[in-house]
Amino acid sequence: MSTNEHAAPVLELTDLSVSFSTRQGLIRAVDGLSLSVGRGEVHGIVGESGSGKSVAMYSLLGLTRDANASITGSVRFEGREILGSGDKAMQPIRGGEIGMIFQDPMTALTPVYTVGWQIVEQIRQHTDLTKAQAKARAIELLGEVGIPDAKRRVDSYPHEFSGGMRQRVVIAMAMSCNPKLLIADEPTTALDVTTQAQILDLMSRLRDVHNSSIVIITHDMGVIAEMADRVTVMYAGRPIEAGPELDVVRHPRHPYTWGLLGAVPRIGERSERLATIAGNVMSPLDVPVGCAFAPRCAYVMDECAARPPWSDGDHRSACWLSDTQRVALRRKES
């Protein structure tokens, strides 16, 4: 866990919103996201597909380039505003100070260059290493992420790797310059359980050795429990719960978070079916003005027609249920 709770945050998002104008209407992919990531801290962003997790991270790096996109709010990295910065200003930041593990390894690598060439190019772009030193570093990284015979495979092309192997290459590239902030978008996708553990351990060592901060985007509560210091839960583009990992996992305040945790299988317990969250994922065109989760919530009430405010304190949620109601409902469910 982070020991830098009182240091200035490495990353600070304030009321970040990302919307897209379409023929069907306005899509609010991210709607008022605020979070802070301290130095050496791991911050987990959790939610179903389509909740706005990846769009938020792409936007802070200036990678949301749709002509119909509107991005507002504030993104401060190392104390300086970077939202809206041009490519020239972002060039030393992307890959150098902020590393990104992209979710889809099939499209994250250029097919006409070897994986080693691509890692070496990034290292030389952001460091003073020679070509030979950068290649040695690339081989070292490939070995650390579990690529067998890394000295030979460094000269292989992406199509010569399986999907899981390509994911490891993407992870090696993101970590190549020991970034101050690592954004990991579903970093363990397509990896077996053993390799998942190795990758999470590698990310932990990056934090421990270089005091790097990490943002993990995932729907896997197990990864959150393993890695995160703090958690932000998102639904339909909106943050709905945030706080220290232990508080969010052990004492969740929002019914959506209850559903996410309830769907996690528990060792030693047998049941005919895993718990599920009723209904379907919300279309971004149909998000209600009030509580976004209301159409799927078993505890919906009249107040939910209005958007709930954030509660006070370090562990916050956006829900109209009172503390007394939450305790009673959780006791009834358990």
Image (tube, grey):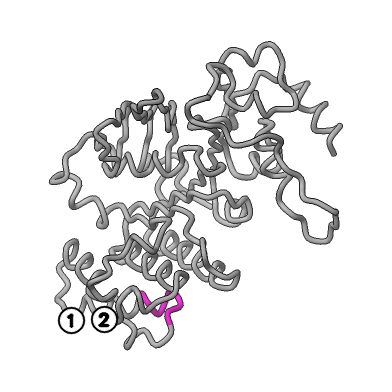
Kind of residue at badge 2: Ala
Q: Residue furthest front?
A: 23
Judge left or right: residue 310 versus residue 266: left
Could you tell me how many numbered marks the image carries?
2
Q: Which residues are magenta?
A: 141-147
Query: In the rendered image, is residue 48 in sight?
Result: yes
Residue at x 71% of width, y 47% of height: 263
Report if residue 214 lies within the magenta region.
no
Q: Which quadrant of the figure has residue 154?
A: bottom left
- Is residue 8 visible in the rendered image? The answer is no
Q: How far apart are the two marked residues, 1 and 2, measured between alpha carbons? A: 6 Å
**CB of mark 1 within 8 Å of CB of mark 2?**
yes
Residue shown at 39%/58% (left/top)?
101
Drawn side of residue 240 relative to residue 88, left or right = right
- Tag 1 residue: 132
Residue 142: x and y, percent?
Answer: 37, 76
Label 1: few (<14), some (14–19) or many (≥20) C-alpha neighbours in 10 Å: few
